[in-house]
Amino acid sequence: MTYLAARRIRNYLVAGGVPPPLRDNVVMQGTSDTPATETADQYKARLGSYVRGKDPIAMQREAPRTLANLIEGAPDEMLDRRAAPGKWSVRAILAHLAEDELVSSWRYRQMIEHSGATLPGFDQDEWARLGDYDSWTPREALEMFRLLREANLRMLARLSPEERQRYGIHAERGRITVEDLARHMAAHDVNHINQVRRSLELQEAPA
Ligand code: NI
């Protein structure tokens, strides 16, 4: 069991609730990123399918623009609505993308500077609470995401092939290289872009 899964169960118990079911190889992914029934392996396979045969750097470059186009003209109510209790609003997803890019900034540089470094995980729902994601404006969140992303792409473009193969030991994903992380982040974008698109489409569908 991962640290985060253990922590979630403890939180449920402290709150006097029933712990969420856990089977072998089933990691509670956080209600915000994934369907509740998806296992860690299914999540990994799904994200892998988003980047297979594609250029992750080009995908990463495109993501902020894609998101800007998606939310353009959407009224605040649509950006604030949660698809279900415990799910994130579009506004919160944008704040999550910005703060996740912040994490990646640190991780890329740790791996390059200290190849083999440990990369601790973080509890994204706790970060959402700490950062009060629902209070961000979509424009602020997207702008922070875009600028952090640009800084990372600028750095990645200048790395030597050897530097791209430097690695860290991720708390949940094990050994990952700089290149692996860049690929993962491109897929992570797609996951949330799809989530934003679905949320807005569902709200636009006639009742
Ligand atoms: Ni995410």
Image (cartoon, rainbow, N blue to C red):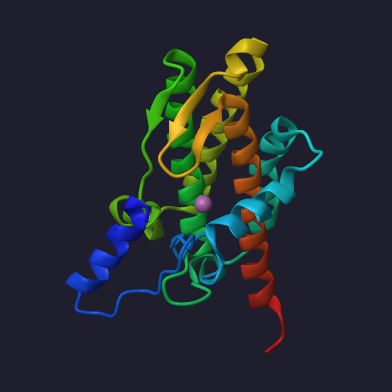
Of residues 185 and 161, the one drawn nearer to the viewer in this rendering: 161
Locate residue 20: give its quadrant: bottom left
Q: Position of residue 2 (x, y in %)?
A: 37, 52
Of residues 75 and 4, the one drawn nearer to the viewer in this rendering: 4
Q: Say if 73 sits above or below 106 in the image.
A: below
Q: Identify which residue is drawn at 72% across, 86% down.
A: 206
Q: Position of residue 68 (x, y in %)?
A: 65, 49
Q: Identify which residue is drawn at 67% across, 13% down.
A: 161
Q: Position of residue 166 (x, y in %)?
A: 54, 18
Of residues 158 and 183, the one drawn nearer to the viewer in this rendering: 183
Does residue 132 appear in this view? no
Q: Identify which residue is drawn at 74% across, 33% down.
A: 58
Q: Residue furthest front?
A: 24
Q: Say if 88 sits above or below 164 in the image.
A: below
Q: Identify which residue is drawn at 28% across, 58% down.
A: 7
Q: Quadrant of the N terminus?
A: bottom left
